Amino acid sequence: KRREDPFRIDRCDASVVNDMEKSHLYLVRHCESLGNHENIFQGQLDLDISATGEKQLALLALRFRNIPIDAVYSSPLKRAYKTAEAVNLYHSLPIIKLPELMEVDVGALSGMKLDKAFADYPVFAEKWQNSPQNCIFPEGETTAEVYDRAKKALARVKADCMGKTAVITSHGFLLRCMACEILEHDIERLSDIRIGGNTSVSEFYIGKDGSVETVRLSDKSHLPKELLGDPNQYVVHK
């Protein structure tokens, strides 16, 4: 008996795939990087992917092989771009790099161990944990600046891909801001949005009229337990 593919969407389902009044959008966080493995703040530090990341990407590619895709957009940073290549493995589409999809510039925190960063910058740590919409990264960006970039990238993809299916591969904080814009249209609701886990997949239908249907958020069902990673990696531990 043929095993059903839980991620497949029939190319002939015009009501879903070819609805010219909707964009079908996937947000995919990058695979595990060397920075994730070492528990550091990476921001725009362009570190390569880890051995675990390579395994995650092999499974992500299989997840997307039978899903019809019209466009792939990626942050230019290695960890996101290699994730885009995995998504695109069975599709051979051009991958469009958008600098707006880069992770937050964490400034002085770049390359620091997470625990040390939280300990050395307690005001930042408190906002990161409790009011992320108000974060100011020391010598780096503010959340408002990241949110604005995410909003611009989302507008570009929606304009390009109305009636089409697009995949965006990017970073945890950037995608959190983008999901907040999709679901809430309000940066003040950022603390209500959780986008986490390497190669997590979030899926939406976004109507031309502004309507949103959420299919899944931060889904990692393509990964076995040993490849899931720590869901609380970026939580401030007191």
Image: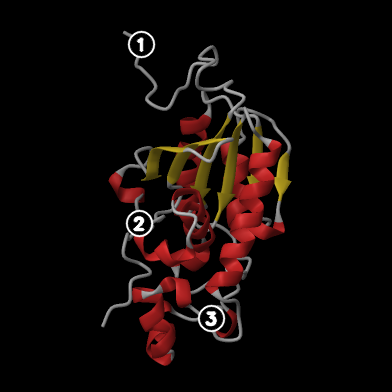
Q: Nearer the viewer, mark 2 or mark 3?
A: 3
Secondary structure of the residue carrying tag 2 is loop
Secondary structure of the residue carrying tag 3 is loop
Q: Is residue 158 above or below residue 49?
A: above
The spot of residue 173 in percent (x, y) is 49, 63
Circle 3 sits on which residue?
137
Circle 2 sits on which residue?
229
Q: Are marks 1 and 2 in contact (CB under 8 Å)?
A: no
Residue at 43% x, 89% y is 121
Residue at 57% x, 22% y is 19
Of callouts 1 and 2, the N-terminal one = 1
How far is the residue under mark 2 from the one under mark 3?
Answer: 25 Å
How far is the residue under mark 1 from the one under mark 2?
Answer: 31 Å
How would you rate the neighbour count of disc 3 (Cα within 10 Å): few for under 14, some for 14-19, many for 20 or more? Answer: many
Residue at 59% x, 58% y is 150
Foreground pick, 126 / 114: 126
How far is the residue under mark 3 from the one under mark 1?
Answer: 51 Å
Of callouts 3 and 1, the N-terminal one = 1
Q: Amino acid at mark 3?
A: Phe
Q: Is residue 50 above or below residue 237?
A: above
How would you rate the neighbour count of disc 2 (Cα within 10 Å): few for under 14, some for 14-19, many for 20 or more? Answer: some
Q: Amino acid at mark 1?
A: Arg
Instruction: Tell whether 35 sits left or right of 221.
Output: right
The spot of residue 127 in percent (x, y) is 40, 79
Instruction: Tell whether 177 sits left or right of 165.
Output: left
Foreground pick, 153 / 106: 153
Residue lying at the far left of the rendered structure: 238
Q: Is residue 121 above or below residue 218?
A: below
Circle 1 sits on which residue?
2
